[in-house]
Image: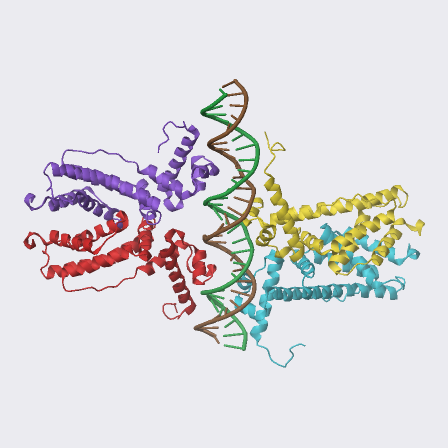
Chain colours: A purple, B red, C cyan, D yellow, E brown, F green
Amino acid sequence: MINTNSRPVDPRIERTRQVVLAAALELISERGFGSVTVEAISERSGVARSTIYRHWKQLPDLMLDALAAGIERSTPLDTGELRSDLIVFVCELVELLTSDEFSQMAMALIVESHRDPAIAELHSRFLRGRQQFTIAAIERGIERGELPTTVDARQMAADLAAPVFFRALIQHVPIDEAFIDQHVDRWLAIHRGPSHT
Amino acid sequence: MINTNSRPVDPRIERTRQVVLAAALELISERGFGSVTVEAISERSGVARSTIYRHWKQLPDLMLDALAAGIERSTPLDTGELRSDLIVFVCELVELLTSDEFSQMAMALIVESHRDPAIAELHSRFLRGRQQFTIAAIERGIERGELPTTVDARQMAADLAAPVFFRALIQHVPIDEAFIDQHVDRWLAIHRGPSHT
Amino acid sequence: MINTNSRPVDPRIERTRQVVLAAALELISERGFGSVTVEAISERSGVARSTIYRHWKQLPDLMLDALAAGIERSTPLDTGELRSDLIVFVCELVELLTSDEFSQMAMALIVESHRDPAIAELHSRFLRGRQQFTIAAIERGIERGELPTTVDARQMAADLAAPVFFRALIQHVPIDEAFIDQHVDRWLAIHRGPSHT
Amino acid sequence: MINTNSRPVDPRIERTRQVVLAAALELISERGFGSVTVEAISERSGVARSTIYRHWKQLPDLMLDALAAGIERSTPLDTGELRSDLIVFVCELVELLTSDEFSQMAMALIVESHRDPAIAELHSRFLRGRQQFTIAAIERGIERGELPTTVDARQMAADLAAPVFFRALIQHVPIDEAFIDQHVDRWLAIHRGPSHT
DNA sequence: GTCTAATCGAGACGGTACGTCGAGTCTTACT
DNA sequence: AGTAAGACTCGACGTACCGTCTCGATTAGAC
């Protein structure tokens, strides 16, 4: 579905897209999702309002694209050992959820996905994308014998993420390294089974 | 001579407050937090727009009160056994987070509490209120010897709630009774310690 | 129609009337007719808004009364000579029409009398009242032989007043003593007839 | 490069101006100056309220323009004889001041010019414009020998207009043809001097 | 290199909701 | 009964954005 070489695309179009989305992202993190106006995006980006509407039919559509642009992620991640893989993963997640620029967006994504199926799809793609890394790490752990073969990797990935989301977004409690270490170790203790005690 | 409780106040004031807040709550659950309009509240409640502004300086203030009014809760809850207490608690939470009327409000509460300290306070009061029930049940469990005396009740309550929030609000995955049973049993298995295995 | 002794009248009523009308007059001359609000009158007079509405059904009614109160006038005026009578009369008129406190009211009276019959009546009573003094002076002049017996006193009074109104209210031109003298002398020259040349 | 006449401007702008001003004038003459509402103008003209505010920052500004538009006038007027010139002039003035559509506006102009310098300027331009016609007629009369060369044309024009304004606007008395004839003839008798008697 | 068509900037337009102000009505308690 | 205090409805104010719409100026990319 990508516009490969069928038509070279006017460079102005791409330029406008970039500039507008960047401005939108800036505004989302500065003022929050609900206070972003087309007017403000136009002003910030230097792109005329009419041009913005030529590219996106509605403000929500623009927001959707902006969120999509803000989400891109691609860490391979493989330290060779399960525990450190998980620590890295959790640290990244914490950083993401507590950084001012991103948490606004994350919240927006979560909230709006309850109403808008398009955002829901985006949101679940994002979530699955991240979980995939964890699941891969877990599976490597199983292969290495660090975990029993009977476990459900998907469930375990959720068990790892849930408390982090809960604390960061819902309880609204600061998360330090000590917590992360303890959390991962508890998780390992539970899932490795009694033999590893 | 101060108007503590000596002045009986105009009954219309209370009446207006009730009617307006009720209308606001209706609209929040129907159309979501972001699409609620003073105009709409006025129309729905039959109270003039200017009157609403006499009671609340800004729409957010009204929303705050509406959310506060929507949150009230007071279950005593004590079945005499830990497992069934927890099952009841989790069921209630699931019901709350998945009901259309309430989940909108919960999301709003969570999102806005990241921006507005007043809402943050409200949100944390609400959370603490609910956690309190769980903590009490856990402590009763400890007294009855169903749990070791060494556990941290607060942490355990969080462990019980986190996956429910995660699934309902973030993963956006349906939660059935089977999951609840399994979740509670896993939780018990982990916290009861090896003696109960 | 006056409330003589049929009922003693609550003194508070009269007091309220006075205070309110005085405040209204003040505000009319300060801010002009169009910017007077019941709210402001209430504040200025210290009389509650509801009380004001108990005395006057509408703001215009109050205004009407205020204007009526501001118009009262009762100069006898008789210098014994026509020319000086007229000079005095014109001077008074000029003063009235150019004083800040009164001109606002005069304009209001004139304008509103085009729409409201009650104000029209008030206005014409006021005009007739003033003209009456001039007519009387003219008639005394006729008796003294200063004017021919054939003249129409009513018409002549109008001829004297018209240019003053025109300059003061319509042309919006300052009126000095020189003009007044010249105006009266021209008037005398015209109406005394050729014999006096 | 300045937008003198180089930029053709959006034709919609002119169209909106016209339609709105026309509606405003209609409403001024129907309901009087004080009861004209942006809301009503919007409804009557079919132009959105926000568009009206884009053209005029405040309602008074709009009113000013509407009055200016309603005042335009351009009669050359020259019958070849002084008396008939004056009769025509006075008739026109009477018609103007007694027509419902215009008298409201005239009053508004007069009243508001006491408060707002911009309206004062407009008002005096209007007055001077009209007086100019009379002065020209008088000067033609002087050239033709119908009037002595010693007279002050400006003063005479005022003498002609003053009683008409007085009767129409202040005394609020109907003006018929008989009055006009008599008024002009008296004026002529006075100003032609004794030679013409 | 021009030329033509896509793209853009500027901004008018009809809307909807905002938060404010004042009018006029109504209710309650005080004096 | 008259008053003070102030809640209530209603309607207009002027503001801020929305999404739609011309309309001229400016670039590509094809010739």
Say how many tags the image has. 0
Query: In the rendered view, does A33 fall on the left or right side of D69?
Result: left
Q: Is residue C25 above or below residue A80?
A: below
Query: Which residue does the image show at 14% across and 64% down from the upper left?
Result: B80
Q: Where is the N terminus of chain D found, in terms of image quarters?
A: top right
Query: In the rendered view, does C193 fall on the left or right side of D6?
Result: right
Q: Position of residue B97 (x, y in %)?
A: 28, 55
Viewer-nearest residue: B153 or D49: D49
Query: Which residue does the image show at 7% across and 55% down from the upper left?
Result: B196
Q: Position of residue D103 (x, y in %)?
A: 71, 55
Viewer-nearest residue: D2 or B25: B25
Query: In the rendered view, does D127 fall on the left or right side of A31?
Result: right
Viewer-nearest residue: C12 or C116: C116
- Quadrant of the rendered structure where residue A118 is? top left
Furthest-bottom residue in this view = C6
Q: Position of residue D96 (x, y in %)?
A: 75, 53
Q: Position of residue B109 (x, y in %)?
A: 32, 53
Q: Is residue C72 above or below residue A13?
A: below
Viewer-nearest residue: B120 or A166: A166
Kindly tell me whether residue D64 is visible in this rendering.
no
Kindly tell me whether residue B179 is visible in this rendering.
yes
